[in-house]
Image (tube, rainbow, N blue to C red):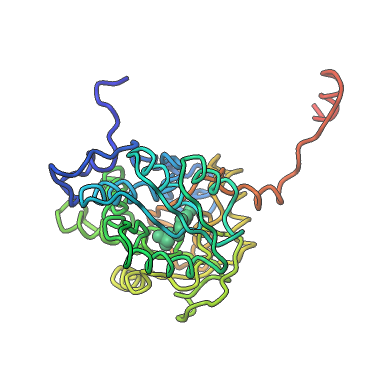
Amino acid sequence: MGSEARQGVIDRYREWLPVGDRTPRVDLQEGSTPLVRSRNIGPALGLSALYFKYEGLNPTGSFKDRGMVVAVAKAIEEGAQVLVCASTGNTSASAAAYAASQGMRAIVIIPAGQISLNKLSQALVYGAKVVQIPGNFDAALATVRDLAEHYPVALVNSVNPYRIQGQKTAAFEIVDALGDAPDYLILPVGNAGNITAYWKGFKEYHAAGRSTVLPRLVGAQAEGAAPIVKGAPVAEPKTVASAIKIGNPASWENATLARDESGGLIDAVSDTEILQAQLQLAAAEGLFAEPASCAPLALLVRLVREGRIERDSTSVIVLTGNGLKDPDAALGNVEPPVTIDGDARALAKVLKL
Ligand code: AN7
């Protein structure tokens, strides 16, 4: 061990967060994720600087942990004993883990049959009560909002402002790592909490003189679940990127504010583009991200080709969730393992060595 133990989000950015002496020390060493410089995709596109913020390395495998740690600490400070959330998967895994670490009860409501087995297994193994309901994420969120209004449970979806507070620390880390804000920050948009949080974080650091510029925020939605791009809710969202299969984002207005104030854009990519980007990212960079996290790469490729992102600019793509979370779709696009029963000679023959 080095002399400094790694700090979680609350300790690392304490003075930027609404925490005090009475806030319990919740910490799974979330945050401080790598900002990996692109070795191949950026140069192939002619980009001078492309980075990936590898949020899949958080304790439960997604960026949700940054906000969850603050939401749970504040819930405990305010006397809550039960956490509740609706989820497309990652929020439920994160809520379940932080509840477990604090000896609290977690209840997660998920759209039946629509979240990946790996995310579901996380919530179950961490000990949450998992309830499936018919319909999609939007219906699940409406149900838990109603529950939290009438019963003594703390709602930890990103409509909880402490979630946004915690998630803004990812913007701080990017500025701390690069020495300034990038020109473009590109991320997936589902319920739109994260784009809201990044914009808040970049603005706060800029106001405090930590950066000289503000980035343009570029949001990627999936074509079949693109309410913000279309300008109207989508009743039956459809996409392979189940994490962002959301038809009526709770933070819609904040997302359009972030887009417009920053001079950015929100656009949609197809499932085919998403899956291509996922394989490209893994094969060309050695980074495995879940489908939702690859929508921004698909969008970046298009924007660079169309000349809408300048080649001498600095871009950061947020890889919001680990590829191990949801490998099924990717497995459909790779060669299955070969089986042989033989010696090294037989193996060499198969391998064409
Ligand atoms: C990997 O877990 O909504 O736009 O319930 O898991 O802040 O909603 C997950 C969202 C992007 C979208 N990437 O972020 C949930 C949930 C991944 C995600 C998003 C999610 P927001």
Residue reaching furthest front?
A: 151
In terms of image quadrants, where is residue 258? bottom left
Q: What count of labels does the image hold?
A: 0
Residue 187 visible in the current orientation:
no
Residue 238: % across, % down = 60, 68
Residue 308: % across, % down = 45, 68
Q: Is residue 241 above or below residue 125?
A: below
Task: Determine the residue positioned at 59% across, 65% down.
Answer: 239
Image check: 59 left or right of 333? left
Give 343 or 175, whichever is nearer the viewer: 343
Task: Determine the residue positioned at 12% across, 42% down.
Answer: 21
- From the image, which quarter does the C terminus lie in? top right
Q: Is residue 105 above or below residue 200?
A: above
Residue 38 visible in the current orientation:
yes
Residue 49: % across, % down = 41, 49
Image check: 221 left or right of 334? left
The quadrant where ligand 1 appears is bottom left
In terms of image quadrants, where is residue 26? top left
Give 142 or 295, whichever is nearer the viewer: 142
Task: Determine the residue positioned at 43% across, 53% down.
Answer: 107
Residue 47: % across, % down = 46, 53
Task: Determine the residue positioned at 56% across, 71% down.
Answer: 237
In terms of image quadrants, where is residue 314? bottom left
